[in-house]
Amino acid sequence: MVLLISSLLFYSWGGPKYLFLLVMDTFVSWICALGMEKYSKNKKLFLILDLVFMLGVLGIFKYLGFFLTNVQMIFGIPETIPSIVLPIGISFYTFQLISYDIDVYKGQVKVQKDFWKLLLYSSLFHQCIAGPIVRYETVANEIDNRVITINDVYYGVRRFSIGLAKKAVLANSCASVADTLLPIGSENLAVVPTLGLWLGGLFYALHIYLDFSAYSDMAIGMGRMVGFHYLENFNYPYIAKSVQDFWRRWHISLSSFFRDYVYIPLGGNRGSKSSYIRNISVVWFLTGLWHGASWNYILWGLYYLGFLLLEKFYLNKKIPKGFNHVYTLFVVLIGWIIFRFENISELFQVLIGLVGFTKGGFYSMVVGTQFKANVFLLIASIVACTPFGKIIHNIFENISRNGNNIVFTLQNVIDTITVPLLLILSFLALIGNSYNPFIYFQF
């Protein structure tokens, strides 16, 4: 109950009126799940009712404005388009509740009899507003039966501190450089040199990973502190060796959601080649649309669809091993450019600028200054995107276990100072920055 009250207060901080929406969605899912259990012969009807309601609410708040804007462009109606504010985290908690009801329908989880416990699941402040998307089966037992150990608390605090430092020290700084070299809605975009666009794209790619994975780190850490064991949401995606491998490592909870609740029910890779292409096309259209009500997100989803199909039927065995990682990073970097610019004209301007068609030429002193001023930030951010630190820590640990007292002592000293050092650095980085939004809040 303490967790529930804390979670509801935390969520209402971003807009109390949208707390009602979260509670209402949860109540409908709770009622539909109870209906599936009580009236098992008609459980499909209750599932359909739940899906229609949940997706309908999500559609109104997230996509109605986008739909009406496009209708207005084609037919000239309606005269005015209502301005609808997107409630924080609506995509995340909607998908969580949908997964709960589908799993109840399939018999994979038991119905939660207590409404407030299901509300706790949907509103847990650790991950409610920006993920990861937590399946009910992951935390069902821990809602009632949590065992919190000193090791859990230590791991949770350490993981939270790492996430906070990634956000405050690295992600925010990368965002600042990206906003300078890839400004949105600015006339300066037209005069950014080609090299500046590539450098800006690189910093944006670093920013979006460090920012989103930082939130996941903090959510996992805070969950562990109070006895919840959330699954990992990232697995070093920038070391991927193919686009398919990248999406096995990036936003794992979203990828697995679409796999289990859309792709497999449609037939997956079973059946004919055309059926497979249809199924994966639906998934990637929805993946793009999930991220935002704008054509660039749909284009971003279809962009990845194209490369996944190329890898499946043509590229998979034709890219030399020495170049597959470079190829993947190139595809991902261009993908993030598409992802960043909702304005299609700005997106086109940047894409042609990347190949040299820009008023700013190839290079400028401003780009050189930005690079020199942020070279250490660039190196640190790149290292933070790799398992380098984890590998070093494991090497120290293995040497310590073999009886090396010097390394054992050194490792303990490092482990002892890591958390306070990261917290101090994060505090210093946040001084003066009154607004530090996580990028995935908008989705």
Image: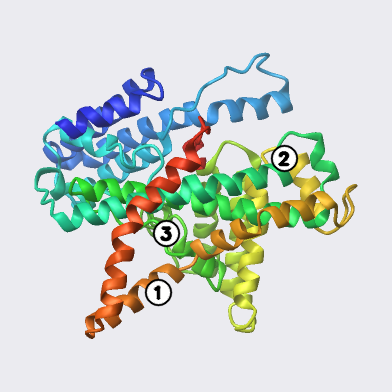
- Expressed as whole percent of the image width and height from the top left, the position of residue 84 reads 52, 21
- Expressed as whole percent of the image width and height from the top left, the position of residue 48 reads 32, 37
Q: Residue at x 73, y 41 (%)?
A: 344
* Amino acid at pointer 2: Pro
Question: Which sits earlier in the primary sequence, circle 1 or circle 3?
Answer: 3
* Amino acid at pointer 1: Ile
Can you identify the residue that label 3 sits on?
Answer: 234
Can you identify the residue that label 2 sits on?
Answer: 183
Residue 244 appears in the rendering: no
Q: Secondary structure at mark 2?
A: loop
* Amino acid at pointer 3: Phe
Q: Is residue 438 left or right of residue 198?
A: left
Q: Residues within 10 Å of mark 3 (few under 14, many from 20)?
A: many
Marks 2 and 3 sit apart, C-alpha to C-alpha, by 28 Å
Can you identify the residue that label 1 sits on?
Answer: 391
Question: Which sits earlier in the primary sequence, circle 1 or circle 2?
Answer: 2
